[in-house]
């Protein structure tokens, strides 16, 4: 039986400082690699990645809206197993995908080789990219922007601006407080007598949501207790944005916000959206 530190559990029931990391990242912990990859490529769920039909529609819309085509250079940040990269490459674009997950990048490379697609995959933390005026478009899709603390966000925006050619487009989507209010789970626990998402053997999952409404930030915290191992704490942070806030952040980083959408397949922005799709540009004369 696991020795559970009740004092530590009590401490973890209190809200931590904003963006304080957990024991490990859900995205890079090797114990989570297989589960995360399986979730990414599951065509029936919108969890780690969106469904294949949505990804194809997204690439179609972005390509058409930005007039991207054969020969256009595109960088996909947080590319995971290469689902968007594949669709871009099929349409003839020169694609680079960056992701920190060893398992996802290995899968993406294998799939590209099997299909004869020329895609450059880089296993790297995308906060460390160093490109200079190389891309016509850069993508950061499915809320990846929202997980970043302000300092990391602003540093990444500077790198993205530098990596774009003058006039190049930065395409991203962010969550809103409306989505959070509808879908956040306050507190839950579940026991797994067999293999589950978090571990390949029996384990207990304690989940709690912490809200920081004055900052527009939410934390989904997961404590994993195994029968014969230490507790692990995973924290998934999300900074939600309003249309005005995301526009202000991008303008402050030197981008021109071209348009806001309800998603990245061309749905008009509603008054209370769950998501905001953003098309911004590095100014042509910069």
Image (tube, grey):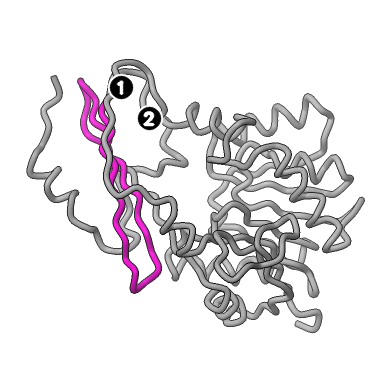
Task: Say the numbered circle drawn on residue 198.
Answer: 2
Mark 1 crowd level (few <14, some 14–19, many ≥20, 10 Å Cα): some
Rendering coords of residue 76 (x, y %): 68, 51
Q: Nearer the viewer, residue 168 or 202?
A: 202
Q: Which residue is mark 1?
A: 192
Residue 27 position within the rendered picture, expressed as x and y whole percent measured from the top left: 47, 41
Apparent side of residue 129 relative to residue 147 in the rendered image (left or right) = right
Q: Secondary structure at mark 1?
A: strand
In this image, 251 relative to 231: left or right? right
Judging from the image, what secondary structure is the residue with disc 2 in?
A: loop
Q: Residue at x 48, y 28 (%)?
A: 35
Main secondary structure along the magenta-highlighted residues: strand
- Find out whether the residues at labels 1 and 2 contact each other: C-beta distance under 8 Å: yes
Distance in Å between CA atoms under marks 1 and 2: 10 Å
Disc 2 residue crowd, few under 14, some 14–19, many 20+, Cα 10 Å: many
The residue shown at (55%, 28%) is: 38
In which quadrant will I find the N terminus?
A: top left
Q: Residue at x 61, y 31 (%)?
A: 44
Which of the 4 image quadrants contains residue 130? bottom right
The answer to whether residue 242 is above or below residue 180 is below
User: Marks 1 and 2: which is nearer the front?
Assistant: 1
Residue placed furthest toward the left: 7
Quarter of the picture containing the C terminus is bottom right
| Residue reaching furthest to the top | 194
Q: Position of residue 105 (x, y in %)?
A: 61, 36
Q: State which region is magenta.
A: 204-233
User: Could you say which disc has been placed on residue 161 in the image?
Assistant: none
- Tell which circle, 1 or 2, labels the residue nearer the N-terminal end: 1
Q: Is residue 262 magenta?
A: no
Residue toward you, 23 or 13: 13
Q: Position of residue 209 (x, y in %)?
A: 31, 51
Q: Is residue 223 magenta?
A: yes
């Amino acid at each position: 039986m696991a020795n559970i530190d009740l004092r530590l559990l009590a401490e973890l029931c209190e809200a931590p400082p904003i963006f304080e990391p957990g024991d490990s990242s859900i995205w890079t912990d090797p114990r989570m690699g297989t589960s995360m990859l399986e979730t990414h490529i599951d065509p029936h769920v919108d969890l780690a990645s969106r469904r294949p039909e949505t990804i194809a529609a997204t690439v179609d819309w972005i390509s058409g809206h930005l007039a991207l085509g054969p020969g256009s250079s595109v960088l996909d940040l947080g590319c995971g197993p290469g689902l968007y990269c594949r669709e871009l490459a099929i349409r003839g674009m020169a694609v680079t995908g960056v992701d920190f997950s060893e398992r996802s990048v290995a899968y993406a490379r294998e799939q590209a080789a099997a299909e004869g697609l020329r895609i450059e995959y880089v296993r790297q933390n995308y906060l460390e990219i160093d490109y200079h005026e190389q891309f016509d478009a850069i993508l950061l899709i499915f809320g990846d922007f929202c997980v970043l603390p302000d300092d990391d966000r602003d540093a990444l925006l500077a790198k993205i601006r530098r990596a774009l050619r003058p006039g190049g487009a930065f395409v991203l989507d962010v969550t809103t407080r409306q989505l959070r209010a509808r879908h956040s789970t306050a507190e839950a626990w579940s026991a797994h007598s067999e293999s589950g998402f978090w571990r390949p053997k029996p384990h207990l999952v304690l989940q709690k949501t912490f809200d920081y409404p004055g900052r527009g930030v939410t934390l989904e915290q997961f404590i994993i207790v195994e029968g014969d191992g230490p507790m692990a704490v995973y924290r998934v942070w999300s900074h939600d944005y309003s249309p005005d806030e995301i526009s202000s952040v991008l303008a402050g980083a030197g981008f021109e916000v071209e348009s806001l959408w309800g998603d990245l397949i061309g749905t008009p922005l509603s008054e209370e959206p769950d998501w905001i799709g953003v098309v911004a540009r590095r100014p042509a004369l910069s």
